[in-house]
Image (cartoon, rainbow, N blue to C red):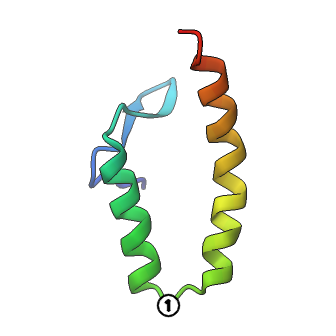
Amino acid sequence: MFSNQRGMVEIKAGSGIFVTDVPPSIVSDSIERFYAFTGRSHEDLITLREILEPEIAALAAGNAGA
């Protein structure tokens, strides 16, 4: 079963799970807590950034003219 404790996703029966429009502070707080309380290393954080940042940059570039 999927948990939506922080309201970051919307579950639509028959359609799927979608990310909601959440403030960036909620996302950054969640990432910070994950690393602070799960014993992850700095290398793990770098790996996460390598995964997220190219997509974020692509989305920003695509929305630059909007």
Q: Which amino acid does label 1 sit on?
A: Gly
Q: Quadrant of residue 21?
A: top left
Could you tell me which residue is drawn at 31 percent across and 40 percent down?
23
- On screen, residue 56 versus residue 33, left or right, reads right
Q: In which quarter of the image is residue 45?
A: bottom right
Residue holding disc 1: 39
Q: Where is residue 53 in the image (x, y as percent from the top left)?
A: 65, 49
- Label 1 environment density (alpha carbons within 10 Å; few <14, some 14–19, many ≥20): few
Q: In which quarter of the image is residue 11?
A: top left
Q: Where is residue 55 in the image (x, y as percent from the top left)?
A: 68, 40
Above or below, 36 relative to 57: below
Q: Which residue lies furthest to the top in this view?
A: 66
Q: What element carries label 1?
A: loop
Q: Position of residue 10 (x, y in %)?
A: 37, 34
Above or below, 64 relative to 52: above
Could you tell me which residue is drawn at 36 percent across and 73 percent down?
33
Could you tell me which residue is drawn at 33 percent across and 62 percent down?
29
Q: Where is residue 56 in the image (x, y as percent from the top left)?
A: 61, 40
Q: Which of 26 and 18 is in front in this view?
A: 26
Q: Nearer the viewer, residue 29 or 64?
A: 64
Above or below, 30 relative to 12: below
Q: Nearer the viewer, residue 14 or 62?
A: 62
Q: In which quarter of the image is the N terminus?
A: bottom left
Above or below, 2 relative to 41: above
Q: Residue furthest front?
A: 65
Could you tell me which residue is drawn at 28 percent across and 44 percent down?
7
Instruction: Please give the count of numbered marks on the rendered protein.
Output: 1
Q: Which residue lies furthest to the bottom in this view?
A: 39
